[in-house]
Amino acid sequence: MWAELVASPLFGIALTMAVYLLAQLLYRRIGRVWANPVLVAIVTIVLLLKGSGIDYRDYSRGGDLLLFLLGPSVVALAVPLYQRRADILQHKRPILVGIFAGSLVSIVCACGLAWLLGGSRAVILSLAPKSVTMPIAISITAKIGGVAPLTAALVVLTGCLGAVCGPEFCRLIGIRSAAATGLAMGTAAHGIGTARMFEINRLAGAVAGLAIGLNGLMTTFLLPLLIYLTGL
Amino acid sequence: MLFFQLCGEILSRLFDLPFPGNVLGMALLLIALRTGLVKIKWLEEAAEMLLSNMALFFVPAGVGVMVYGDLIAAEWLPITVATVLSTFAVMAVTGLIAQKLDVGGSKDVG
């Protein structure tokens, strides 16, 4: 009976939601950025699966259904972009130039460093979209031949790193404007960074949300071009 | 939204474009909203629900990494260095450029 239950998609979905809810409660209790619910939930589920000897394929039957919802979530990003179109148009030059530069630096810097340190092609390609929001990053990596789960982990790690250190780092290097900090956080650390900015300053959070969508678009278009140019 | 994703997927496959279907779907939806073909009211609630629960959908993707434990262990150095340094580089470049070009909202971050 147990084997049957575990093999049904219900198991993966229920486990993911239960652990995620607990992780969220824990995050609210502790209130520390390093207790990021996504990170905590992933580590917990991996440990549970390893500890109980449940096959990853059994888990993924349900997990994949949740993962599927990332697709329409990307399409849904069009809604906040549309709602903020007036702000975007008013400041389009700094926003576009800033995010474009960030997108380019992210790809070149991550891939370049990995290449210099002897990373394999799969790792280099999986690193490329790591500053992009998860659903877009997964689609990009699948399209260019990276390893989707590796990209997923790197996206989460990048997001947590940015959310934990981002605001302090920005202040340290002399970024004082709230909007500029939000743009930097959204471009470098996507949704997890944006959530942190909303805790600090509403304007910065809104700008960060905008940067998620635009960076996703720019990386989507830049990356195939760069891969073509460098012949990777 | 599923409909727009489907249209995006079809476009992506049909013309063998290097862009994922869901990003094309997002662009199509933006155009549809802009031209008034689709009213924002129809979507607002569903979009809000998806976006506010987006973090949950990340979790299975992250769990999938356990299958690739060996690949990560073998190349942990390039992975770690590239991830950490490039994240800070992006923040510095984007933030400083935006501030220089005056993105507005010059109020100090509290």
Image: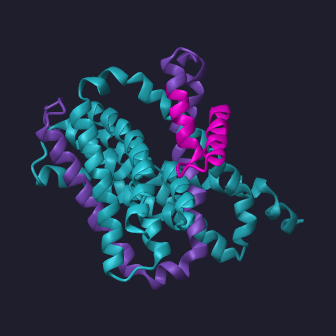
Chain colours: A cyan, B purple
Determine which quarter of the picture holds residue A198.
top left
Viewer-proximal residue, A114 or A65?
A114
Considering the image in quadrants, where does the N terminus of chain B appear? top right
Q: Which residues are magenta?
A: B1-30
Outermost right residue: A1
In the rendered picture of this protein, how many numbered marks are placed on residues? 0
Residue at 69 percent across and 70 percent down: it is A56
Give residue B2's position: percent from left, percent from top.
Answer: 66, 35
Q: Main secondary structure of the magenta part?
A: helix
Give residue B29's position: percent from left, percent from top.
Answer: 55, 28
Task: Tell me: residue B35, above or below residue A38.
Answer: above
Viewer-proximal residue, B57 or B104?
B104
Residue at 31 percent across and 63 percent down: it is A108
Give residue B59's position: percent from left, percent from top.
Answer: 56, 56
Residue A13 visible at all: yes
Give residue A216's position: percent from left, percent from top.
Answer: 43, 46
Viewer-proximal residue, B35 or A172?
B35
Considering the image in quadrants, where does the C terminus of chain B appear? top left
Q: Is residue B38 left or right of residue B100?
A: right
Residue at 14 percent across and 49 percent down: it is A171
Residue A22 visible at all: no
Determine which quarter of the picture holds residue A64.
bottom right
